[in-house]
């Protein structure tokens, strides 16, 4: 969770070094793909997994990371972006209801409403008056992360390296094309990236996208999902603490109040899901 929480301030540091946000997301996915190729060995799954694998790869590899970087790029304050990512849980439950026809109990509906209420309280923080675009992108990031979790449930029998390699492939290629269309000549932009920015991008790819996820999958071998999932509520706490240490961000009273409501709602959603 420390690794997951660190992804946001580390990405902001790279963006502050003038790395284009969409290109950075593409390079991150490209590094993930490069590292996983020896484990993937270009194996192709059976046809019944095609649709779910493509939808998961587009949601996770393209949408989540591009909206994460855009939210940080258009925000001067990182902590609300980190907290907004917690909406992935209620979004995921809503998506499972629409896509998988799963029932949502009254308690879940109540907690979903309270989680969004917590975000609404944070919106009234005067410090966020110039960060609404970033918060909008953060909401889209959470939405697609929730969708990715729904699609991943249909890929349980696939090898993890195949899933992550597919995510890296889709993310790298599609985001590189989008970056060239929107951000200009990608070759020129890549040449301008300094060494410290490459280190930050590599950290995101290796420590966050690979090591953190592999550690979670390792834990799933010994513990139930119900025991592990509540720990996801720790990553915004680590992320906010790192944002304070790196960028000297001091949370306001409204942010603390809204944050407590959001995190508590998400924890309870985990317990009854």
Image: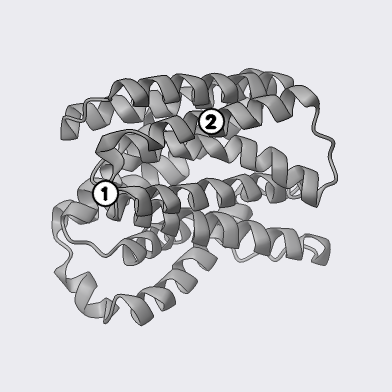
Does any portion of residue 76 appear in the rendered image?
yes
Q: Quadrant of residue 172?
A: bottom left
Query: In the depicted view, which residue is nearer to us: 224 or 105?
Result: 105
Tag on residue 180? none
Residue at x-position 47% and y-position 73%: 173
Q: Classify residue 26 by image quadrant.
A: bottom left
Q: What element carries label 1?
A: loop
Q: Which of 270 and 222 is in front in this view?
A: 270
Residue drawn 78% across and 25% down? 106
Percent across and percent down for residue 114 are: 59, 26
Secondary element at tag 2:
helix
Badge 1 is on which residue?
130
- How many marks the image carries: the answer is 2
Q: Which residue is drawn at 54% across and 67% down?
A: 170
Instruction: Give the residue pinned by disc 2.
Output: 117
The residue carrying pointer 2 sits among few (fewer than 14), some (14 to 19) or many (20 or more) residues within 10 Å by Cα, namely: some
> Cα distance, mark 1 to mark 2?
20 Å
Residue 228 percent location from the top left of the image: 60, 22
Evaluate whether residue 222 shows in this view: no
The answer to whether 30 is drawn above or below residue 179 in the figure is above
Left or right placement of residue 187 versus residue 171 in this view: left
Q: How crowded is the residue under tag 1: few (<14 C-alpha within 10 Å), some, or many (20+)?
A: few
Image height check: is 79 above or below 97? Answer: above
Name the quadrant of the N terminus: top left
> Residue 19 appears at what percent x and percent y?
22, 62
Image coords of residue 163 (percent x, y): 62, 54
In contact (CB < 8 Å): disc 1 and disc 2: no
Query: Residue at the spot x=73%, y=49% of the render?
Result: 155
């Amino acid at each position: 969770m420390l690794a997951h929480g660190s992804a946001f301030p580390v990405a902001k540091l790279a963006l502050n070094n003038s790395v284009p946000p969409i290109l950075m997301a593409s390079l991150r996915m490209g590094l993930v793909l490069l590292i996983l190729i020896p484990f993937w060995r270009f194996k192709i799954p059976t046809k019944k997994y095609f649709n779910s694998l493509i939808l998961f790869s587009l949601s996770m590899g393209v949408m989540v990371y591009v909206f994460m970087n855009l939210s940080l790029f258009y925000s001067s304050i990182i902590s609300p972006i980190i907290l907004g990512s917690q909406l992935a849980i209620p979004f995921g439950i809503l998506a499972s209801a629409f896509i998988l026809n799963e029932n949502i109990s009254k308690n879940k509906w109540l907690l979903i409403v309270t989680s969004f209420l917590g975000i609404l309280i944070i919106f009234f923080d005067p410090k966020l008056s110039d960060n609404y675009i970033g918060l909008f992108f953060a909401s889209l990031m959470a939405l697609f992360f929730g969708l990715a979790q729904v699609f991943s449930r249909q890929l349980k029998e696939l090898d993890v390296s195949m899933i992550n390699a597919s995510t890296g492939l889709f993310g790298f290629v599609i985001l590189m094309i989008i970056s060239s269309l929107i951000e200009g000549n990608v070759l020129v932009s890549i040449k301008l990236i300094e060494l410290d920015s490459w280190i930050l991008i590599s950290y995101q790819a290796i420590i966050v996208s690979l090591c953190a996820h592999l550690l979670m999958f390792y834990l799933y071998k010994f513990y139930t999902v119900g025991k592990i999932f509540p720990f996801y509520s720790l990553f915004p706490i680590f992320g906010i603490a790192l944002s304070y240490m790196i960028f000297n961000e001091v949370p306001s009273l409204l942010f603390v109040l809204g944050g407590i409501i959001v995190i508590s709602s998400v924890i309870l959603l985990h317990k009854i899901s």
